[in-house]
Image (tube, grey):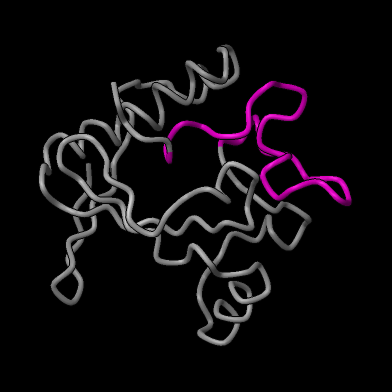
């Protein structure tokens, strides 16, 4: 876990407990992979930071499931997730990135609309929602990271 402080905001970078996660990503069921590499690490940090907030950049345009997300989402451990960009449209997001010269993943320039784990992120086809390239061919469209942690 790495901690950063900038302008009074503490940013925490978290990692899975698994040493060889790249190998596991290629060998494992994507639900198990997401649990190990995304859900468990965030669950640990939320549990440790009871009563704090979680700032998220999810937007409703990203998928059918995310259309039902709210600005404030209560989570377990007395955490409130705040979706600061919930009503932003894709063009607004990219305008903001370009106007403010923000760093972004260049895979977006190659046709990716959503970037997750390396073995599962694919370029989407015309007309698909932006999350369709995440787990192509699988009955999955969210990793679980933005689902309520009720476990």
Q: In the image, what residue occupies the spot 65% across and 61% down? A: 106
Q: In the image, what residue occupies the spot 68% across and 30% down? A: 135
**Prevailing secondary structure class for the magenta stretch in the rendered image:** loop
Q: Is residue 9 above or below residue 56?
A: below
Q: Between residues 24 and 59, which one lies in front from this camera angle?
A: 59
Q: Between residues 16 and 85, which one lies in front from this camera angle?
A: 85
Q: Is residue 123 magenta?
A: yes
Residue 20: quarter of image: top left
**Which quarter of the rendering shows the C terminus?**
top left
Q: In the image, what residue occupies the spot 39% across and 56% down? A: 56
Could you tell whether 51 is left or right of 64 in the image? left
Q: Is residue 108 above or below residue 9?
A: above
Q: Is residue 130 magenta?
A: yes
Q: Is residue 143 above or below residue 79?
A: above
Could you tell whether 135 is left or right of 148 in the image? right
Q: Position of residue 32 (x, y in %)?
A: 48, 16
Q: Position of residue 33 (x, y in %)?
A: 49, 21
Q: Position of residue 25 (x, y in %)?
A: 54, 22
Could you tell whether 20 is left or right of 89 in the image? left
Q: Position of residue 15 (x, y in %)?
A: 32, 36
Q: Residue most toward the right? A: 126
Residue 76: quarter of image: top left
**Which quarter of the rendering shows the N terminus?**
top left
Q: Count numbered badges in the picture.
A: 0
State the extent of the magenta-drawn residues as a range: 117-146
Q: In the image, what residue occupies the spot 18% across and 67% down? A: 9
Q: Residue most toward the bottom? A: 99
Q: Is residue 102 above or below residue 11?
A: below
Q: Between residues 112 and 74, which one lies in front from this camera angle?
A: 74
């Amino acid at each position: 876990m790495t901690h950063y402080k900038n302008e009074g905001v503490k940013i925490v970078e978290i990692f899975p407990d698994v040493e060889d996660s790249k190998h596991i990503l290629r060998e494992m069921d994507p639900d198990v992979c997401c649990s190990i590499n995304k859900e468990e690490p965030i669950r640990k940090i939320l549990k440790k930071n009871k009563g704090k907030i979680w700032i998220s950049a999810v937007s409703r345009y990203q998928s059918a499931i995310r259309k039902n997300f709210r600005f404030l989402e209560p989570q377990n451990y007395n955490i409130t997730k705040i979706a600061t960009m919930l009503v932003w449209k894709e063009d607004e997001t990219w305008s903001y990135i370009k106007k403010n010269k923000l760093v972004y993943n260049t895979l977006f320039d190659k046709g990716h609309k959503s970037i997750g784990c390396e073995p599962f992120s694919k370029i989407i086809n015309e007309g698909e929602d932006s999350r369709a390239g995440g787990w192509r061919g699988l009955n999955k469209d969210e990793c679980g990271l933005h689902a309520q942690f009720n476990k």
